[in-house]
Amino acid sequence: MQGILFGGVIIVLFFVGVVLMRIVFLERKLRRLFGGKREKTLEALVYAHAEALSEAQDNIKKLDDAQKALEDVVLDAVQKVAIVRFNPFPDSGGDQSFAIAFLDGNNTGVVLSSLYSHNRQLVYAKPIEKGASRYALSAEEQTVLNRAMRQ
């Protein structure tokens, strides 16, 4: 009788060992599932992940809005610059005169011209809106404007 009882105890101990091994295995899986978080239940973990996802979506929306605002700012910034040097007076030496265009993404900006002669230097500024000026442009000013718009 004692042999049967001893055999029964061995079988029960074997099953207890198997159950303990399964518990350890399941605890490892749960730790991996919870990712080391302190939530005690699966429901708490799901809520924590949903909250983190909501925060991430809010951050993405904020970043998208910031990107659009930056695109608007960049569109209004000087993006295109071209310069032409020339000699407006055949009797004076060198290409000391110049025309320079500063345009934004909408081809709006200014063309500056500097005419140099022996006894004076004249500077002109002509506003440009959407690639055109309401003032007459010299050949050099039109050239520099066209070069800037092609960029």
Image (tube, rainbow, N blue to C red):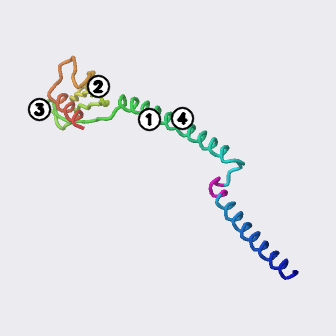
Q: Nearer the viewer, mark 4 or mark 1?
A: 4
Query: Which numbered circle lies on residue 67?
Result: 1
- For badge 2, the amino acid type reads Thr
Q: Where does the image place residue 73, in percent across and percent down from the top left?
A: 41, 30
Q: Which residues are the magenta region?
A: 30-35
> Closer to the camera, 30 or 11?
11
Specify which label sits upstream in the sequence, 3 or 1: 1
Query: Which numbered circle lies on residue 38?
Result: none
- Residue placed under numbered mark 2 in the picture: 108
Secondary element type, mark 3: loop
Q: Residue furthest right?
A: 2
Secondary element type, mark 2: loop
Say few, some or many: other residues with alpha carbon within 10 Å of mark 4 (under 14 / 14 to 19 / 20 or more).
few
Dot 3 and dot 2 residues touching (CB under 8 Å): no
Q: Where does the image place residue 143, in percent across and percent down from the top left?
A: 17, 32
Spatial CA distance of label 2 from label 1 is 22 Å
- For badge 3, the amino acid type reads Pro
User: Could you tell me which residue is drawn at 27 percent across and 24 percent down?
Assistant: 123
Q: Residue furthest top?
A: 134
User: Could you tell me which residue is drawn at 36 percent across and 28 percent down?
Assistant: 76
Spatial CA distance of label 3 from label 2 is 32 Å
